[in-house]
Amino acid sequence: MNDKNLVISYPRMGNYHILLEKSLKILFPDANILTPPQMSARTLEIGTRHSSENVCAPFKYNIGNFVEVLDMGANVLAQTGLGCIFGYYGELQEQILKDLGYEFDFLCFSQGKAAMQTAFATYKKLGGKHSFATLAKASFYTLSGMHIMDKLEYKMRENMTFEAQAGDHESWHHKFLDDLRTVSLVKTPTLWHHYKKKLDSIELSKSCDQLRIGLVGELFTMMEPFSNFNLEKELASAGCSVSRKMNASLLVFSRKAKSLAGSDGYLTRLPGANGADTIAQTLSYAKQGYDGVIHMKSFGCTPEINIMPALNKLSHDMNLPVLHLSFDTHTGEAGLQTRLEAFVDMLRMRKMGGALC
């Protein structure tokens, strides 16, 4: 296929599409890189219609997003995931879409250790002219940019509730994303130092009665705001400092054995996906004196279900309240809001009753 005839797209998740688009543009300079629409109720409705009832919500979101971009003219789909959700489902997603009558090439990065080799073979089949070294280089700069984005957003989540002037963090975050779209991948690392200084300059008003809540759980549900009803912003607006270590950087760079060791005996073997990270991070939050933890997962996510007994034991042993939240196609925002408000109120009463400033 001629490079000029390619219309390449992918499923959306958080803000990572900015980096993926830049990387694809390097590899296919003459192709049309089609930005997928933001996740929406329509996306989920389409995905639910064409997926098994019992499959997890992230799978349905991905199918829905794929259908949306195929209807917009995409003829190449990039499967970007590296973890459990995408790794097991990539081939199934491709088959569902082809059974629906869509014709496209599938650029899959989620086939285990052979992912890069398989992707490179597909890249050459599509008329790509760059070498494997160029593909690896583009991947390196994309991962570097992803790491910077994750660090900046982590810093923002922890401090935005303390800002003296509401909206300062979000304003700088939007400017960062705008610059990320235009700066070359090679120069992406320079953005970290610039915007870290900007965030450090924001006036904060901290007090010891503000709650600190850690978020743990399944990757997609935590990282795609639409799928969790913008839970992080809801907590920030309620006066809570939010910490979320789970992000794409952790997925790519973490070592499962280290996460298992970090579970301190609450797990004796790896449960799959990022289950061990959930336990290790919850234990870390407990030791740091966080007020509570919210465990977020897609309904039916087996690894996260499997670690719930260990998580509940940890909660009891460390006297750390844990709220379990499951998200699926039937989750209602009003019900979620009620549970969230009750949890925050309970944490506040505990803090007022037992903590000293």
Image: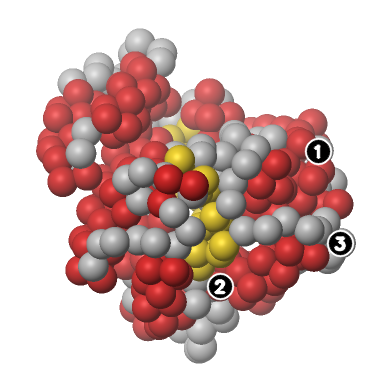
Q: Is residue 26 visible?
A: yes
In percent of width and height, residue 98 lies at 73, 64
* Neighbourhood count class around disc 2 (C-alpha, 10 Å): few under 14, some 14–19, many 20 upward: some
Left or right: residue 25 versus residue 71 is left
Residues at circles 1 and 3 in contact by the CB criterion of under 8 Å: no
Q: Which residue, given by chain and number where applicable, does mark 1 sit on?
A: 332
Quadrant of the rendering where the C terminus is positioned: top left
Position above or below: 103 against 35: below
Q: Residues under labels 3 and 2: Cα distance?
A: 19 Å
Q: Earlier in the sequence, mark 1 or mark 2?
A: 2
- Residue ID at (25%, 62%): 130
Residue at left offset 23%, top offset 67%: 131
- Which residue corresponds to the image point at 45% horizontal and 40% vertical from the top-left? 32
The amino acid sitting under disc 1 is Gly
Q: Earlier in the sequence, mark 3 or mark 2?
A: 3
Q: Is residue 67 above or below residue 39?
A: below
SS for tag 1? Answer: loop
Seen in the picture, residue 262 relative to 15 is either above or below; the reply is: below
Check disc 3 and report the residue beneath it: 53
Q: Position of residue 349 (x, y in %)?
A: 59, 35
Give the left or right position of residue 237, taking residue 16 as reference: right
Find the distance from the CA under tag 1 to the CA under tag 3: 18 Å
> Which residue position is annotated with label 2?
87
Task: Of the two numbered discs 1 and 3 on the same chain, state the one appearing first in sequence.
Answer: 3
Mark 1 or 2: in front is 2
Is 329 or 268 nearer to us in this picture? 329
Amino acid tagged 2: Gly
Please rate how many residues cluster around mark 1, counting C-alpha atoms within 10 Å: few if below 14, some from 14 to 19, many from 20: few
Describe residue 49's horizontal placement relative to residue 143 as left or right. right
Question: Do callouts 1 and 2 mark residues in contact (Cβ within 8 Å)?
Answer: no
Between the C-alphas of marks 1 and 2, the distance is 29 Å
Outermost bottom residue:
268
